[in-house]
Amino acid sequence: MNGADTSWIIVATALVLFMSLPGLALFYGGLVRARNVLSVFMHVYAIACLMSILWFAVGYSIAFGDGGALWGGLGKSFLSGVTVDSLSGSLPEVLFFAFQMTFAIITPALIVGAYVERIGFGFVLLFSGLWMLVVYAPVVHWIWGGGFLSDGGIFGEIGVRDFAGGIVVHETAAIASLLIAIFLGPRKNQSVPPHNPGFVMIGASMLWVGWFGFNGGSQLAADGGAAMAITVTHISAAAASLTWAAWEYFKYGKASLVGIVTGTIAGLASITPASGFVGPVEALAIGAVAGVLCQEAVNLIRNKLKIDDTLDVFAVHGVGGIFGSIMIAVFGEGSFIAQLGSLLIVGVFTTVVTIALIKLVGLVVRLRVDEESEYNGLDLSAHGERAYDFTS
């Protein structure tokens, strides 16, 4: 065990949990109407709790167990055989488990942004739990757990490169988001602006800080590689923020607060898979392009395809993560065949299994709330609470 590495990953674990609680909750919560903000908080919070237990029960074993090329098996269920002295590289294995658990929390939590303001709470819990176990955890094993997409797998000695989750996290969550949005159908009223842009900025800022643990922690060591990952993460986020705002100003004559912080997230998502493989100049290029690319993807999905992915999960996280994964090969740090092939394999797998889960879970619990509940807001109809009391 290395004490410095262990200390850093303890901090990184806290930072990645901070991304979900409260970062993502505030970011998403500020973007919805006032009558739905508590439902967003509830979705993210409950998902964090449920994923933690499921990751402990079987998720970690499926992802990082000693099974075959397709899954890790159940040998490490409930951390069987993992003691205080067990190591994963230079880290206590229980710390590696905890660090990866925070990824298993935020990935299904990202999907929340696609279905807010109209989905049933029971569907959120049942779908998220099953999806994490049968989509996310196997993909983790394929890429990070020594599975068939990693080095020595189907692509030969040079397997897929995905440093912190452009494919594992962002592509999978984004595809699931788009599919749920399609099955749900659009909201009755899509024209209401975000109720609290201040929440959005605060949440985005927390995500930005937490992303240092997300990307820097993925080095799994306290060394120059971790420092470089943090540096390129910051540069990409800053560049994408500025290009998003500039492109918005060019098109509409105004640059919005919600726009610039959405650009931040686009830059962060885009650098995530490449953060362990590129330098600051490449990060500047990735972020600068991402700010415009993801904004145009929002316009395509929302205005041209008319898909109500409420908070633009696919356009920002999906397009960003896929773009960053391809840029690894563009900058010569990976194989185009491995990058594109893995994106395709994971994309098809995620699509097929997610559609099956939506239909299966829909047979058990209601997918969409009734029209009256949607009109009154999910805070009151689903949870019996209001975020704001304007009478007191």
Image: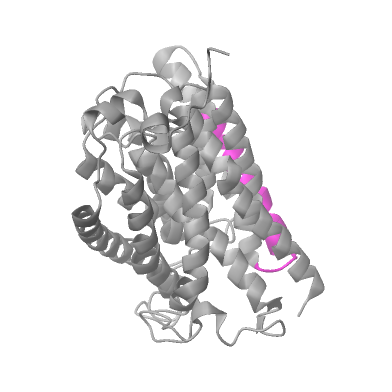
Q: Quadrant of residue 80?
A: bottom right
Q: Is 87 covered by the magenta stretch?
A: no
Residue 229 appears anywhere in the view = no
Is residue 272 found left or right of 359 in the rendered image?
Answer: right
- Magenta residues, dominant SS class: helix
Q: Is residue 227 above or below residue 185?
A: below
Q: Is 227 covered by the magenta stretch?
A: yes
Q: Nearer the viewer, residue 45 or 290?
A: 45
Q: Quadrant of the C terminus?
A: top right
* Residue 263, image x, y percentages: 50, 34
Q: Is residue 199 above or below residue 131?
A: above
Segment colored magenta? 220-243
Is residue 288 found left or right of 369 in the rendered image?
Answer: right
* Residue 195, image x, y percentages: 47, 21
Q: Quadrant of residue 190?
A: top left
Q: Nearer the viewer, residue 148 or 206?
A: 206
* Residue 231, image x, y percentages: 68, 49
